[in-house]
Image (tube, helix red, strand yellow):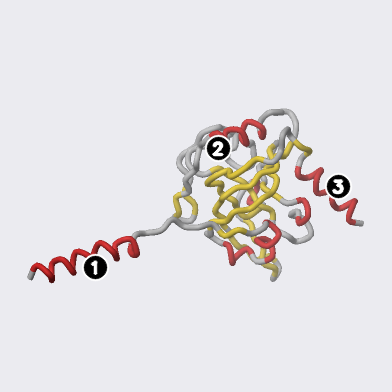
Amino acid sequence: MRILWCVAFVVCFVSAPLFAQQAEQPIKTTLCEIKKDPMAFNKKLVEVSGYGSHGFEDSMFEDPTCFWDDGRPGIWMEYGGTAATDTMYCCGVTPSKEKKPLIVQGISVPLVRDGIFTHFDDLLHSEPRKEISIRATVRARIFVATESINGRTLFAGYGHMGCCMLLAVEQVVSVESKKPEPSIFDLARKYEAEAH
Protein backbone atom coordinates (compact mmCIF):
# COMPACT_ATOMS: atom_id res chain seq x y z
CA MET A 1 0.00 0.00 0.00
CA ARG A 2 2.88 2.35 0.79
CA ILE A 3 4.31 1.76 -2.67
CA LEU A 4 0.97 2.67 -4.23
CA TRP A 5 0.85 5.95 -2.23
CA CYS A 6 4.44 6.74 -3.20
CA VAL A 7 3.71 6.14 -6.88
CA ALA A 8 0.57 8.30 -6.71
CA PHE A 9 2.51 11.09 -4.98
CA VAL A 10 5.32 11.00 -7.58
CA VAL A 11 2.85 10.99 -10.48
CA CYS A 12 0.98 14.00 -9.02
CA PHE A 13 4.17 15.88 -8.17
CA VAL A 14 5.79 15.33 -11.57
CA SER A 15 2.67 16.01 -13.66
CA ALA A 16 1.46 19.09 -11.75
CA PRO A 17 3.71 21.53 -13.66
CA LEU A 18 2.44 20.09 -16.94
CA PHE A 19 -1.09 21.16 -16.05
CA ALA A 20 -0.16 24.53 -14.61
CA GLN A 21 -1.39 27.41 -16.72
CA GLN A 22 1.43 28.95 -18.70
CA ALA A 23 1.64 32.67 -19.35
CA GLU A 24 0.48 33.64 -22.82
CA GLN A 25 3.42 34.34 -25.10
CA PRO A 26 3.11 37.28 -27.51
CA ILE A 27 3.20 36.75 -31.27
CA LYS A 28 6.25 38.65 -32.56
CA THR A 29 5.09 40.37 -35.74
CA THR A 30 4.90 43.75 -37.46
CA LEU A 31 2.18 46.34 -37.74
CA CYS A 32 2.22 45.86 -41.52
CA GLU A 33 1.51 42.12 -41.10
CA ILE A 34 -1.35 42.88 -38.73
CA LYS A 35 -2.84 45.30 -41.28
CA LYS A 36 -2.69 42.64 -44.01
CA ASP A 37 -5.02 40.33 -42.05
CA PRO A 38 -6.47 42.13 -39.00
CA MET A 39 -8.94 39.39 -38.06
CA ALA A 40 -6.09 36.86 -37.71
CA PHE A 41 -4.78 38.99 -34.83
CA ASN A 42 -8.10 39.90 -33.18
CA LYS A 43 -7.83 39.52 -29.38
CA LYS A 44 -4.25 38.21 -29.73
CA LEU A 45 -1.26 39.34 -27.67
CA VAL A 46 1.46 40.67 -29.98
CA GLU A 47 4.91 42.21 -29.69
CA VAL A 48 5.49 44.94 -32.26
CA SER A 49 7.72 47.94 -32.91
CA GLY A 50 6.36 51.22 -34.19
CA TYR A 51 5.75 54.85 -33.37
CA GLY A 52 3.40 55.83 -30.58
CA SER A 53 1.97 59.24 -31.35
CA HIS A 54 0.16 61.85 -29.32
CA GLY A 55 -1.64 65.03 -30.24
CA PHE A 56 -5.10 66.48 -30.65
CA GLU A 57 -7.39 63.63 -31.74
CA ASP A 58 -4.27 61.47 -32.12
CA SER A 59 -3.25 58.46 -30.05
CA MET A 60 -1.91 56.07 -32.65
CA PHE A 61 0.67 53.30 -32.82
CA GLU A 62 1.80 53.13 -36.43
CA ASP A 63 4.53 52.19 -38.88
CA PRO A 64 5.19 54.92 -41.46
CA THR A 65 5.91 52.27 -44.13
CA CYS A 66 2.29 51.03 -44.00
CA PHE A 67 0.42 54.00 -42.65
CA TRP A 68 -3.35 53.99 -42.34
CA ASP A 69 -4.36 55.61 -45.62
CA ASP A 70 -4.77 53.78 -48.96
CA GLY A 71 -7.42 51.47 -47.51
CA ARG A 72 -5.22 50.17 -44.70
CA PRO A 73 -6.76 50.37 -41.23
CA GLY A 74 -5.35 52.71 -38.62
CA ILE A 75 -4.21 51.49 -35.22
CA TRP A 76 -5.45 53.47 -32.23
CA MET A 77 -3.35 53.14 -29.07
CA GLU A 78 -4.76 52.89 -25.57
CA TYR A 79 -3.01 51.81 -22.38
CA GLY A 80 -4.18 48.76 -20.46
CA GLY A 81 -4.99 48.93 -16.77
CA THR A 82 -6.08 52.30 -15.37
CA ALA A 83 -3.54 54.49 -17.19
CA ALA A 84 -4.94 56.70 -19.96
CA THR A 85 -3.21 58.43 -22.89
CA ASP A 86 -4.63 61.87 -21.96
CA THR A 87 -5.90 62.35 -25.52
CA MET A 88 -8.74 64.67 -26.55
CA TYR A 89 -10.92 63.04 -29.19
CA CYS A 90 -14.52 62.64 -30.28
CA CYS A 91 -16.94 61.55 -29.00
CA GLY A 92 -17.57 61.73 -25.28
CA VAL A 93 -13.95 61.18 -24.24
CA THR A 94 -12.44 63.54 -21.68
CA PRO A 95 -8.63 63.72 -21.63
CA SER A 96 -7.21 62.14 -18.51
CA LYS A 97 -4.13 60.33 -17.22
CA GLU A 98 -6.33 57.77 -15.40
CA LYS A 99 -9.46 55.78 -16.33
CA LYS A 100 -11.46 52.75 -15.26
CA PRO A 101 -9.62 49.44 -15.82
CA LEU A 102 -9.54 48.64 -19.54
CA ILE A 103 -11.89 45.82 -20.59
CA VAL A 104 -12.40 45.29 -24.33
CA GLN A 105 -14.62 42.64 -25.91
CA GLY A 106 -14.89 41.02 -22.47
CA ILE A 107 -11.10 40.82 -22.02
CA SER A 108 -9.42 42.63 -19.13
CA VAL A 109 -6.22 44.28 -20.37
CA PRO A 110 -3.54 44.82 -17.69
CA LEU A 111 -0.57 47.20 -17.85
CA VAL A 112 2.96 46.84 -16.50
CA ARG A 113 3.55 50.33 -15.04
CA ASP A 114 7.30 50.24 -14.68
CA GLY A 115 10.11 52.69 -15.43
CA ILE A 116 10.12 51.88 -19.16
CA PHE A 117 6.39 52.63 -19.42
CA THR A 118 6.84 55.89 -17.47
CA HIS A 119 9.74 56.92 -19.74
CA PHE A 120 7.63 56.22 -22.87
CA ASP A 121 4.60 58.10 -21.52
CA ASP A 122 6.71 61.05 -20.30
CA LEU A 123 8.39 61.38 -23.72
CA LEU A 124 5.03 61.08 -25.46
CA HIS A 125 3.69 64.00 -23.41
CA SER A 126 6.89 66.08 -23.30
CA GLU A 127 5.73 68.61 -25.90
CA PRO A 128 2.01 69.12 -25.21
CA ARG A 129 1.44 71.72 -27.93
CA LYS A 130 2.97 69.60 -30.70
CA GLU A 131 2.04 66.35 -32.39
CA ILE A 132 4.99 64.03 -31.81
CA SER A 133 5.84 60.35 -31.93
CA ILE A 134 8.09 58.01 -29.96
CA ARG A 135 9.60 54.83 -31.42
CA ALA A 136 9.08 51.86 -29.12
CA THR A 137 8.49 48.14 -28.89
CA VAL A 138 5.36 47.09 -27.03
CA ARG A 139 3.42 44.02 -26.02
CA ALA A 140 -0.21 44.70 -26.69
CA ARG A 141 -3.52 43.09 -27.45
CA ILE A 142 -5.15 43.80 -30.82
CA PHE A 143 -8.90 44.35 -31.06
CA VAL A 144 -10.72 44.56 -34.36
CA ALA A 145 -14.29 45.58 -35.10
CA THR A 146 -15.60 45.25 -38.64
CA GLU A 147 -18.06 47.38 -40.50
CA SER A 148 -19.30 46.89 -44.05
CA ILE A 149 -19.85 50.01 -46.17
CA ASN A 150 -20.80 49.71 -49.85
CA GLY A 151 -19.72 46.08 -49.88
CA ARG A 152 -16.28 46.89 -48.48
CA THR A 153 -15.19 45.62 -45.05
CA LEU A 154 -13.58 48.26 -42.86
CA PHE A 155 -11.58 47.38 -39.77
CA ALA A 156 -12.46 50.20 -37.43
CA GLY A 157 -14.59 50.96 -34.39
CA TYR A 158 -12.04 52.31 -31.92
CA GLY A 159 -10.48 55.71 -31.32
CA HIS A 160 -11.41 59.08 -32.77
CA MET A 161 -14.78 58.73 -34.50
CA GLY A 162 -14.25 54.95 -34.67
CA CYS A 163 -11.34 55.36 -37.10
CA CYS A 164 -9.26 52.38 -36.25
CA MET A 165 -8.56 48.96 -34.81
CA LEU A 166 -7.23 49.04 -31.24
CA LEU A 167 -3.77 48.28 -29.87
CA ALA A 168 -4.16 47.98 -26.09
CA VAL A 169 -0.68 48.26 -24.55
CA GLU A 170 0.10 45.76 -21.81
CA GLN A 171 3.84 46.50 -21.57
CA VAL A 172 6.36 48.85 -23.11
CA VAL A 173 9.33 46.56 -23.79
CA SER A 174 11.77 49.23 -24.97
CA VAL A 175 11.93 52.86 -26.06
CA GLU A 176 14.19 53.54 -29.02
CA SER A 177 13.61 57.32 -29.32
CA LYS A 178 15.98 59.48 -27.27
CA LYS A 179 13.78 62.56 -27.78
CA PRO A 180 10.41 63.29 -29.39
CA GLU A 181 10.31 62.68 -33.14
CA PRO A 182 8.04 64.22 -35.78
CA SER A 183 4.40 63.16 -35.77
CA ILE A 184 3.53 59.83 -37.36
CA PHE A 185 1.71 61.79 -40.08
CA ASP A 186 4.93 63.67 -40.94
CA LEU A 187 6.98 60.46 -40.82
CA ALA A 188 4.53 58.74 -43.17
CA ARG A 189 4.62 61.69 -45.62
CA LYS A 190 8.43 61.64 -45.54
CA TYR A 191 8.51 57.88 -46.20
CA GLU A 192 6.01 58.26 -49.05
CA ALA A 193 8.07 61.06 -50.64
CA GLU A 194 11.31 59.06 -50.38
CA ALA A 195 9.63 55.93 -51.79
CA HIS A 196 8.65 57.72 -55.02
Residue identifier under label 3: 190
Expressed as whole percent of the image width and height from the top left, the position of residue 5 reads 13, 67
Alpha carbon distance from label 3 to label 1: 62 Å
Q: Amino acid at mark 3?
A: Lys
Badge number at residue 79? none
Name the amino acid type tagged 1: Val
Q: Is residue 41 above or below residue 95?
A: below
Is 149 in front, or is 118? 118
Residue that numbered label 1 is attached to: 11
Quarter of the image for residue 31 reads bottom right
Query: Which mark's residue is nearer the viewer, 3 or 1?
Result: 1
**Helix, strand or loop for disc 3:** helix
Residue in the image at 90% along x and 51% along y? 193
Q: Nearer the viewer, mark 2 or mark 3?
A: 3
Residue located beneath label 2 in the image? 84
Q: Earlier in the sequence, mark 3 or mark 1?
A: 1
Q: Earlier in the sequence, mark 1 or mark 2?
A: 1
Quadrant of the rendering where the N terminus is positioned: bottom left
Label 3 crowd bin: few (<14), some (14–19), many (20+), radius 10 Å: few
